Image (cartoon, rainbow, N blue to C red):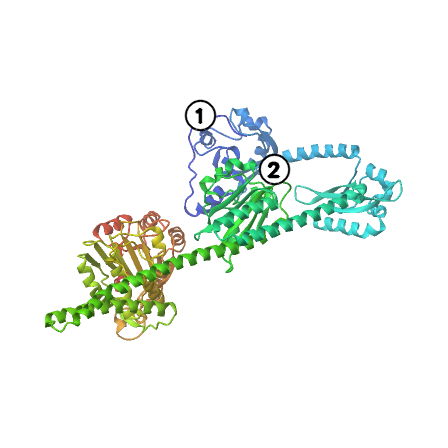
């Protein structure tokens, strides 16, 4: 149906314009191959499905030839040779024509590709006077159907031969389950004539006790179109009844409807009655008893193990032995994304080469499916290979041992949270059973308890170690001030001390008592906080005053260590709702921590940032830094970093624990970060900001600043920070504007094109496409090119404003947004 290679690349201009755009899109995206022909037989246009059918790419010269002026379907010699031209002549004469299937072989034109059968319809499109303007030629690839029909014919021929040659009772029925064709094997076994057994007469040959069951099972399969598998006794021509195994399957036509049924009865009388069947059942019972003994032994062994590694190793070995499998794996969950650390593996000699495999899964495969749902998964090999996540082992999937059938059970803690899983694969014989799943579930439950106990044991040992370190530290810290106090007391015994000596002695005692008082107060604070006895005296406070008070308290320590303290404070007045004393204590402890663990002459940066609904405080130092392990436990009680033997820095390890508790009591969060030892630390506190709602609306003085807009605008707000976007949207709606909110650039671009807002307020730091690129795309689209674009960013330098202007923004606002300025821009 295709012409020879092209001689010209001329093409018609078929680009859609105006209201034709959506029809052009429908034509291009239609799943049916379409070829639009002019009234003189030239090709005007083809769609993607046409290219896919004929395996012709956009760059192919053949496509250019088909769309060129030199090619005409009415004069195509190949179409004429295959008898297609007469049908096309009828279509161009005004008749809707169905073109029969033809066999197309690309090799005839010297092109690659597989042969296929193609049918087509040619439909003329006429004007109001009945004149043909164009002809739409639609093709359909029916190769699979033609090949299936041929296979079916061959299969039916083989089946007929098999029926005539087999010694089994093989029979067929119509779609309703009625016998319509004779079966010589049925007549030979039962002695029934064809007239006796056709229709439903076959039931008369069934044992009276089995007759109702046989008829009911058969009719249920016919009604539900499911395979029949049953057993019943059939009268034998030699006398008596014999047990037969019965199977029947429906044969479907192209429309999915049952065309007929094919079935067979197999004589199983001797097998049914054989003593070997009883011996098999006895062997099965013996095996089950042995299984129970093994499970009991494995349970006892698991209960005796204390370390997580020992539990995992014991479990994989016991499970592999009990369930008779080639592979067993225990994998414990790490983090929040279902990544798995393979903690123990037991492999038979079949997989000996994989015993060194030790790679974490990446949280996307079948392990993550089991752990995420906390439900067992039992799969045959075929089901495993169909499962979308069965190869989810990251880039190391190719090195993972092959799996043959799969059974996995989650390890679930007492609180219902997932701890990991145990999985087995490649059973010695057959597929995994319900019994296998039940056994593995029982062992997983015991192991989960063991893992929790092991973690608790390690935690208790760690807490006990830290308690001992803390008590030793406390003793040292208390002895330090007691030594000068004791010396001062001895000195005061002398009666001839002059006034200067008395003053110095008194100052020593005062300083050391103050130090001891601080230690005791920290201990009492921690005790009250951990027992929930602390009471906050909350009120609306100016956050800058809290920062000032904290700086005043920590100033002497910073100066004594000759640190350079840099302040980058928000110029915007920020109000928080909290206990001012406790908030000062939070900032003081963080600054003191930075000062203590930064070598003399270091730098400390204190930075505050105001957002619509949050206030953020950061303390950044260039001190000794922290290891990842210390970072994870920085806010735990009695945790400290390394310090010198004279203990010139550090305290009791209580300060940051107090910080975390106090911040959380204010509904905030505190985190720490370090690139490693010697690379400094960053502590970040985020507290809820108290927004003065009456500044947005309501009578009074504020009405002079925030009033209803004279004209309602449709405004789109795009910010990945949902809280910030929603607060800004509430403000704009209070001014009387219609507001659209999106959190991702791609969705924002689509919605802007659909709803055409007049103004777009875009955050620059978006996760998928940044705001500058989004602005460029909006500007380049004629539908959205005239919108007013306002950039919102935390960067306000001149070069930042130049970048936003180059991207197409009309205005550039720096976070936190000055609402009055935004209101004036909208006005």
* Residue, disc 1: 7
Q: Residue at x 25, y 50 (%)?
A: 805
Residue 188 pos. (x, y %): 85, 37
Q: Residues within 10 Å of mark 2 (few under 14, many from 20)?
A: some
Q: Give the image location of residue 649, x and y in percent.
A: 25, 58
Q: Secondary structure at mark 1?
A: loop
Other residues around mark 1 within 10 Å, as few (<14) / some (14–19) / many (≥20)? few
Q: Residue at x 43, y 35 (%)?
A: 12
Can residue 587 be seen?
no
Asked if 550 appears above or below 174 in the picture, the reply is below
Task: Using the image as rendered, state which of residue 765 and residue 424 is in the foreground.
Answer: 424
Q: Which residue is mark 2?
A: 98
Q: Secondary structure at mark 2?
A: strand
Q: Are marks 1 and 2 in contact (CB under 8 Å)?
A: no
- What is the tally of numbered marks visible in this picture? 2
Q: Is residue 278 left or right of residue 256?
A: right
Name which quarter of the figure residue 100 lies in: top right
Outermost residue, bottom direction? 700
Q: Can residue 616 be seen in this snapshot?
A: yes
Q: Is residue 56 above or below residue 658?
A: above
Q: Considering only order in the chain, which callout, 2 or 1, is on the residue closer to the N terminus?
A: 1
**Above or below, 265 relative to 299:** above
- The quarter of the image holding the C terminus is bottom left
Which of 45/799 is in front?
799
What quarter of the picture does the N terminus occupy?
A: top right
Question: Left or right of 326: which side holds 586?
Answer: left
| Left or right: where 349 falls relative to 67 | right
Residue 56 position within the rendered picture, expressed as x and y whole percent measured from the top left = 48, 32
Quadrant in the picture for residue 324:
top right
Residue 558, x across and y down, in percent: 20, 60
Q: Which mark is residue 608?
A: none
Side (left or right) of 821 relative to 443:
left
């Amino acid at each position: 149906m295709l012409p020879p290679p092209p001689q010209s690349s001329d093409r018609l201009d078929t680009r859609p314009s105006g209201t034709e755009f959506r029809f052009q899109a429908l034509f291009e995206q239609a799943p049916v191959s379409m070829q639009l022909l002019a009234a003189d037989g030239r090709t005007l246009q083809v769609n993607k499905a046409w290219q896919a059918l004929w395996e012709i790419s956009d760059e192919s010269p053949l496509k250019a030839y088909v769309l060129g002026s030199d090619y005409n379907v009415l004069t195509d010699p190949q179409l004429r040779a295959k008898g297609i031209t007469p049908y096309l002549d009828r279509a161009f004469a005004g008749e809707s024509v169905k073109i029969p299937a033809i066999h197309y072989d690309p090799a005839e034109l010297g092109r690659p590709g597989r042969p296929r059968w193609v049918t087509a319809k040619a439909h003329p499109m006429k004007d109001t006077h009945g004149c043909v303007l164009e002809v739409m030629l639609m093709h359909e690839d029916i190769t699979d159907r033609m090949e299936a029909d041929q296979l079916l014919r061959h299969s039916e021929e083989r089946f007929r031969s098999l029926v005539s040659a087999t010694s089994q009772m093989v029979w067929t029925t119509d779609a309703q389950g009625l016998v319509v064709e004779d079966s010589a094997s049925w007549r030979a076994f039962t002695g029934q004539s064809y007239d006796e057994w056709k229709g439903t007469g076959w039931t008369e040959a069934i044992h009276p006790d089995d007759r109702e069951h046989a008829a009911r099972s058969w009719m249920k399969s016919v009604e539900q179109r499911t395979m029949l598998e049953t057993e019943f006794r059939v009268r034998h021509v030699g006398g008596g009844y014999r047990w037969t195994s019965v199977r029947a399957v429906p044969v479907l036509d192209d429309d999915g409807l049952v065309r007929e049924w094919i079935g067979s009865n197999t004589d199983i009388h001797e097998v049914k009655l054989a003593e070997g069947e009883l011996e098999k059942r006895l062997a099965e019972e013996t095996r089950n008893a042995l299984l129970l003994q093994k499970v009991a032994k494995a349970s006892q062994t698991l209960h005796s193990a204390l370390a997580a590694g020992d539990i995992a190793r014991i479990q994989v070995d016991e499970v592999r032995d009990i369930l008779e499998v080639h592979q067993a794996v225990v994998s414990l969950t790490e983090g929040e994304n279902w990544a798995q650390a393979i903690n123990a593996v037991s492999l038979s000699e079949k997989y000996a080469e994989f015993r060194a495999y030790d790679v974490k899964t990446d949280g996307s495969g079948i392990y993550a499916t089991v752990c995420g749902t906390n439900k067992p998964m039992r799969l045959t090999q075929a089901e495993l290979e169909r499962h979308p996540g069965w190869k989810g082992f990251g880039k190391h999937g190719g090195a993972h041992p092959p799996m043959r059938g799969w059974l996995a059970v989650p390890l679930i803690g007492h609180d219902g949270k997932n701890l990991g899983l145990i999985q087995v694969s490649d059973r010695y014989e057959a597929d995994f059973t319900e019994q296998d799943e039940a056994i593995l579930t029982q062992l997983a439950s015991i192991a989960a308890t063991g893992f929790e106990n092991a973690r608790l044991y390690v935690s208790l040992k760690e807490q006990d170690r830290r308690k001992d370190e803390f008590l030793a530290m406390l003793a040292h810290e208390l002895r330090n001030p007691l030594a000068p106090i004791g010396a001062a007391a001895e000195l005061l015994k002398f009666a001839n001390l002059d006034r200067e000596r008395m003053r110095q002695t008194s100052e020593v005692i005062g300083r050391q008592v103050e130090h001891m008082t601080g230690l005791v107060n920290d201990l009492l604070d921690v005790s009250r906080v951990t027992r929930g006895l602390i009471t906050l005296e909350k009120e609306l406070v100016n956050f800058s005053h809290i920062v000032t008070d904290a700086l005043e308290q920590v100033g002497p320590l910073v100066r004594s260590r000759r640190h350079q303290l840099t302040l980058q404070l928000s110029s915007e007045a920020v109000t928080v709702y909290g206990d001012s004393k406790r908030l000062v204590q939070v900032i003081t402890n963080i600054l003191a921590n930075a000062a203590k663990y930064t070598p003399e002459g270091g730098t400390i940066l204190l930075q505050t940032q105001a957002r619509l609904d949050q206030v953020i405080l950061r303390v950044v130092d260039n001190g000794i830094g922290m290891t990842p392990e210390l970072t994870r436990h920085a806010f735990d009680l009695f945790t400290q970093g390394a310090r010198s033997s004279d203990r010139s820095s550090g305290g009791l390890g209580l300060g940051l624990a107090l910080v975390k508790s106090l911040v959380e009591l204010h509904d905030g969060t505190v985190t720490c970060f370090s690139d490693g030892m010697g690379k400094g630390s960053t502590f970040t506190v985020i507290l809820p900001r108290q927004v003065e709602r009456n500044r947005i609306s309501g009578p009074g003085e504020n009405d002079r600043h925030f009033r209803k807009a004279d004209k309602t605008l449709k405004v789109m707000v795009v910010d990945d920070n949902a809280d910030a976007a929603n607060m800004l949207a509430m403000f704009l709606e209070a001014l009387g504007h219609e507001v659209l909110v999106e959190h991702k650039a791609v969705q924002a671009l689509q919605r802007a094109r659909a709803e055409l807002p007049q103004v777009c307020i875009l955050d620059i730091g978006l996760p998928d496409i940044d705001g500058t690129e989004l602005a460029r795309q909006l500007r380049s689209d004629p539908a959205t090119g005239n919108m007013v674009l306002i950039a919102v960013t935390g960067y306000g330098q001149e070069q930042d404003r130049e970048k936003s202007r180059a991207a197409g923004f009309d205005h550039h606002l720096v976070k936190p947004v000055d609402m009055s300025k935004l209101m004036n821009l909208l006005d």
